[in-house]
Image: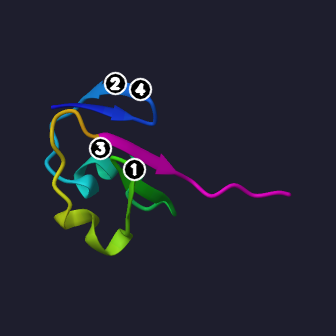
C-alpha cells in the first residue's frame, strides 16, 4: 500500500496505524498520530485501518523551550 508518511511517499505492507508505527520502529515511542488530518488517539491505533493514499503524520514530542 502506498501512503504519505510525514510528507514522504512510502510503500508498506500494513493494515492498521499500529502496524505502521511498529514497522517504522516506533512501537514504544511516545508519539502523536493523525491520519488524513484527524488526530488518532493511541487507544484506537490498532483498530484504525489504513487505505492506499492515506496521509499519516507521526509526531514525537520535542524538549526545550
Residue 53 picture location, percent across and down:
22, 33
Question: Does the stretch in magenta take in 16?
Answer: no
The N terminus lies in quadrant:
top left
Query: For residue 37, which numbered disc appears in the image?
Result: 1
- Mark 2–mark 4 distance (CA, rounded to whole Å): 4 Å
Going from N to C along the chain, the mark reached first, 1 or 4, is 4
Residue 20 picture location, percent across and down:
28, 47
Going by the image, does 31 lie left or right of 2?
right
Task: Report the magenta residues as a range.
Answer: 55-65
- Mark 2–mark 1 distance (CA, rounded to whole Å): 16 Å
| Residue named by callout 2 | 9
Query: For residue 8, which numbered disc appears in the image?
Result: 4
Query: Is mark 2 in CB contact (under 8 Å) with mark 4?
Result: yes
Residue sitting at the far bottom: 43
Residue 37 picture location, percent across and down:
39, 50
Going from N to C along the chain, the mark reached first, 2 or 1, is 2
* Residue positioned 30% across, 27% down in the render: 10
Query: Is mark 1 in CB contact (under 8 Å) with mark 3?
Result: no
Label 3 secondary element = helix
Question: Does the stretch in magenta take in 56?
Answer: yes
- Which of discs 1 and 4 lies nearer the camera? The answer is 1
Residue 58 picture location, percent across and down:
45, 48
Going from N to C along the chain, the mark reached first, 1 or 3, is 3
Q: Nearer the viewer, residue 11 or 7?
A: 7
Amino acid at each position: 500500500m502506498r501512503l504519505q508518511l510525514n510528507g514522504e511517499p512510502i510503500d508498506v505492507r500494513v493494515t492498521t496505524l499500529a502496524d505502521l508505527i511498529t514497522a517504522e520502529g516506533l512501537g514504544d515511542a511516545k508519539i502523536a498520530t493523525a491520519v488524513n488530518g484527524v488526530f488518532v488517539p493511541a487507544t484506537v491505533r490498532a483498530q484504525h485501518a489504513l487505505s492506499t493514499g492515506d496521509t499519516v503524520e507521526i509526531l514525537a514530542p520535542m524538549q526545550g523551550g
